[in-house]
Image: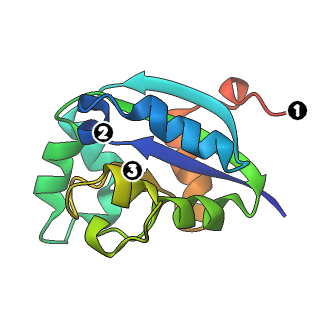
Amino acid sequence: MIERTLCIVKPDAVEKHTAGAILAKIESSGLRLIACKMLRLSIDDAGRFYSVHRERPFYGELTQFMSSGPIVVGVLEGEGAIGRWRELMGATDPAKAPAGSIRREFGTNVERNATHGSDAPETARWEIGFFFAERELCSD
């Protein structure tokens, strides 16, 4: 089934100038990038985006980090895009991610792990809508 998922290249990867390499890995995997832009989240925007984690102990650090610098957000489309993107990213902890995965190659630790991806179709729809209007999605 053709799916869409959100991808975020986090501030740590943008700061290290690896966003292009990450996007190239995405495209070479066969996933299609149908929307993409660079922006900077305010602390309030980061809080709204990660509101599902509001009660978690890492919420404050997460929102601080995600608003600390520019991010690249994109929408990926393809057969089983959610699972394929999550597999390409690798485990949240780069040390536990498989060789060749984005987080293993570009991440530093659990917080600074280079990328974010939606975990389910409902989440993907909400996350894509947070960043993109329908007219910005360039799907065939």
Amino acid under disc 1:
Asp
Residue at image coords 47%, 40%:
22
Considering every residue shown, the one lying at the far bottom of the view is 96
Q: Is residue 43 visible?
A: yes
Image coords of residue 36 (percent x, y):
56, 28
Taking the image as shown, residue 65 lies to the left or right of residue 101, namely left
Mark 2 neighbour density, 10 Å: few (under 14) some (14–19) many (20 or more):
many
Q: The residue tagged with tag 2: helix, strand or loop?
A: helix
Badge count: 3
Q: Nearer the viewer, residue 28 or 109?
A: 28
Q: Hey, which residue is sitting farthest right in the picture?
A: 140
In this view, the mark in front (2 or 1): 2
Mark 1: secondary structure: loop
Residue 27 locus on image (x, y percent): 65, 40
Q: Along the polypeptide, which appears first: circle 1 or circle 3?
A: 3
Dot 2 amino acid type: Ala
Which of the labelled discs sits on residue 140, or is there none?
A: 1
The residue singled out by tag 2 in the image is 13
The answer to whether marks 2 and 3 mark residues whose Cβ atoms lie closer than 8 Å is yes
Q: Position of residue 13 (x, y in %)?
A: 30, 39
Type of amino acid at the residue the image marks with label 3? Thr
Locate the C terminus by quadrant. Answer: top right
Q: Is residue 10 above or below residue 79?
A: above
- What residue did someone put label 3 on? 115
Residue lying farthest to the front in this orientation? 99
